[in-house]
Amino acid sequence: MFRNYIKIAWRNIWKNKLFSAINVISLAIGLSASFVIGLMVYYDFSFDTFHEDGDRIYRVVTDFETPQGNYKNGGVTPPMRIAAKEQLTGVEQSAYFYNWWISEAKAEANKQTFKDPEHIILAEASYFDIFQYNWIAGSKAMALQQPNSVVLTRKRAEAYFPNLPLAAVMGQSLVYDGTISATVSGIVEDYDKRTDFYFNEFISLETAKQTESSDEILGDEWENTNNASQLYIKIAQNSTPEQIKTQLAALSEAHVDSEMIKYNNKRIFNLQALSDLHFDHEYGAYDYSGYEADKGILISLVFVALFLLLLGSINFINLNTAQAASRAKEIGVRKTMGSSKRQLVLQFLGETFLLTLIAAFCSVVFCVLALKTFDSFMAEGIDLSLMVTPWFTALVVVLIVVITLLSGFYPGVVLSRFKPARVLKGSVSSSKEKGVLRQVLTVSQFAIAQVFVIATLLVGKQIYYMLHQDLGFNAEAVAYLQTPWDDFSIDKRLVLEQELKRIPEIQNVSLGGMPPASFNMATRMGIFKKDGQELIQELQILNGDTEYLKLYDIELLAGRPALNDTIEEYVINETGMRAFGFKDPEEIVGQYLELNSHQRLIVGVMQDFNQRSLKDKVMPLMLTGDTSRDRRTNFRTLHVKLTGASSGWQNTIAKVEQLYQEVYPGEEFRLSFVDESISRFYKQEQRIATLLNWATGLAVLISCLGLLGLVIHTTSRRTKEIGIRKVLGASILQINALLCTDFLKLVIVAYVIALPIAWWGLHQWLEDYAYKTEMSWWVFALSGLGMMLLAVLIMSFKTLKAAIANPVKALRTE
Amino acid sequence: MIKITDLEKYYATEEVRTIALNKLSFQVQEGEFVAVMGPSGCGKSTLLNILGLLDDPDGGSFIFNGIEVAGFNERKRADLRKHNIGFVFQSFNLIDELTVFENVELPLIYTGVKPAERKKRVDEVLEKMQIMHRRKHFPQQLSGGQQQRVAVARAVVNNPKLILADEPTGNLDSSNGNEVMDLLTELNEAGTTIIMVTHSEHDAKYSHRIIRMLDGQKVTENVLTEYKSKTLEV
């Protein structure tokens, strides 16, 4: 019986090639999207799921509540490491470690130096109690007990000591930053599963006492919180995270200091579950590759996949119920021969299954292509190898079954309901009710597609707006060159500045901190005393020489710039001026602000400009010179204004690089254009836009295919009517209008439904932006018109053909 | 074999209620060949649908093989139907997507016959209907007469006790029509009960008895050939 079903299913699919193709393409698009998105979701959700008792492992983190806003810090204050062991009950293990950045490591055996080695931590021995590694040499009990001992992962050991067998690496010496030595006391296997614990080098925490940052790592002061100081705990089996949180809250209360009270700041120690580590950007993890897992985006993606699957299924249901009449005789005969309803439903499900299976095969191929196309959109680890996991196979099987049921069940039930006595007499009138369902489905389909179209247009408009909005400074033709961070002196930078000024294609050069808008900005608390009252305000601090404002075209509204590059005088922006209660720029010039317990002079007021993406408002900011040049310079970036056409810049840059290499031989040349780095602020938005473009394109494609199918069906059913109308004198246009109107009505209803949904959703989305584009009426009108035009075009493709056909032929064939 | 008493069937639309069968009663003995005649709309096809368990009567009694089937649900009717009744239609009603062999095989599939046995029986019946050489063809590739022979083959492959034929020669020319009537007669002689709806007096003459209907009622009944030794109760 099953073979019989498959046979007839295959013949039906083959007979209705066009409808089958529409169904397969629609389903394949939905399935491909689901496969790719499934892989992305699986990838991100499979991080750090392999740790023993992972559900009991938590990171202790710190939340700050301040009048300026709330902040999260993934680190803890160093004394917490002791409190966790001595004061917290219900904690089975705790491990403190410090994320250590060094500039070089030297392997004594081969006298080889390694620049900027990453992923090194100074860790308590208990780190290896919480996180299990496979030990190749040494043991977790002994390895980190002594100061100046280090455990390496296999890869790191092989990198440091390429010529030694692993057994011989034990006992070898490493020297960090030329001063701190450590002996290899253990070697572990690198984690081979997905993890955010990238560390390759574990130095015993005691060693930290010999470093310059000893206080920062091991201090007893509760005031400082550094996100390099990490604390993990493993909660005892009989305890709960809530119990620990209560104790942490008590600890927060016990360690409130006067500064916090003064600035009305609150610090709360908190717990973060291991499973959350990969997703919370505010606390951060240890991956610096730039890819960010975002639960919000993943969830949106899942919805996109579901919508696309739904659209594909709708096509299937619509086309199959519409075609019911052509299957009626077969059903009648089968029922007469004794087929039960159940058998018929099973038969149709079998057909759907076969079609879905074909679609799934196509999808796996599409999936491979999509993984290549979306390479830049996805995390590095997402590749074809994920497709051979049991998880992926399970996803494919589950989706095939779900789609088969979703698409095949209803048409199966409708078809199997036919009364054989009637259909065999040839009287199949597809009842009105089924037509209504088809209309509802078509409307839903177009409503979804329409929402996507409106969203795409408006998100695109917002991105355009953000990229083209005047930020308040000139970002065009300005490049900035970052110099080596471990060189604390200004000397070489001054040399380089002088050299660069000699290049004729360079209009101006300024030494300073980062460009006016960047991700990196230092902040300080500023206190203004007036009439016995204190106004406290967080201020962003920007460093720049006397050319800085000129180079970036930032207008000075009152006062003057700093007298020279090193004097600690401040130019405040308008927002900062207003924050301290001044309205007239002239008034604040000459006033003093308290910064770090020193009175500092405000010498000028500059116009506002945006320091971040347009998601954020302009913040109070002050510009000052190189105020700590004697210890370490703040002027680490050279800002270069180029002249001439951008086509010639390549040569200029080559000259800059040559000079840079003369001053800093062998160092990395890091030059970026300011406008390009600004566009990186909107990476997230551009990802959303890419995603939306695809989702919209596919949703519109599926919906239009469905519409085409229905139009073809209706037109062929009405061939005789068209013939009669033409014989009676109807024009081609009249007939075209007749055929299109019914469908066009559905598209219009869909638009009316989509309008408020899209408006509301986009309104919510724009709420996140301090500067938003207008929700212009034309966006909505244009998307509606576009959709209708597209629908008419697609329909006319078929209806015009029917209208033009010779009526005599139509009447004869009927 | 069949006994219907006061059988009623209505078709209702929003405004009018049409009476298709109006308290119709008659019996058919096992092995009989009965022709039902009457003008269009007299209720012949409705009657055949009810006799074939494709439709439910709205009133009256229908005893099939000693069992009252008037109130049966669809599942029970389907079960009874597939084991006992074969159908021959005016428009053949072969499934276009299946070959001759597969069309004939269909009733055996639904009664759960094993594949080897199915092949044997289908081959036998195709041989008997002299259509064996066309077994791999699709219905569209056959002439009308050949298609009706396939339909008859399909009707008898399950060895039903009753064959219901609805205008079996309606779409055929006279020579093909006669061929089909000869086939039916042969089947009847072999013991199968046949009830045939027809417009054709010529075809009706092949039967033992003609029931004439008008407006859902029986008007006359002519016995053409005394059926074996059994007495007809009218």
Image (cartoon, coloured by chain):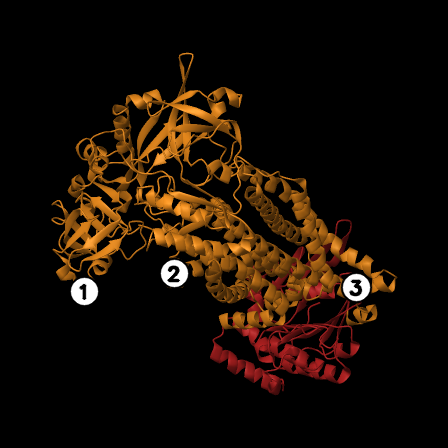
Graded by Cα atoms within 10 Å as few (under 14), some (14 to 19) or many (20 or more), the crowding at tag 3 reads many
Among numbered discs 3 and 1, the one appearing first in the sequence: 1
Among numbered discs 1 and 2, the one appearing first in the sequence: 1
Q: Are marks 3 and 1 on the same chain?
A: yes
Residue A743 coordinates in the image, percent (x, y) = 71, 53
Q: State the residue position of label 2.
A: A386
Q: Nearer the viewer, mark 3 or mark 1?
A: 1
Q: Which mark is residue A803?
A: 3
Residue A251 coordinates in the image, percent (x, y) = 25, 27
Graded by Cα atoms within 10 Å as few (under 14), some (14 to 19) or many (20 or more), the crowding at tag 2 reads some
Q: Chain of mark 3?
A: A
Q: State the residue position of label 1.
A: A163
Which chain is the one coloured orange? A
Q: Camera-side residue: A219 or A46?
A: A219
Real-space Cα separation, disc 1 to disc 2, in angstroms: 34 Å
Residue A600 coordinates in the image, percent (x, y) = 38, 24
Q: Secondary structure at mark 1?
A: loop
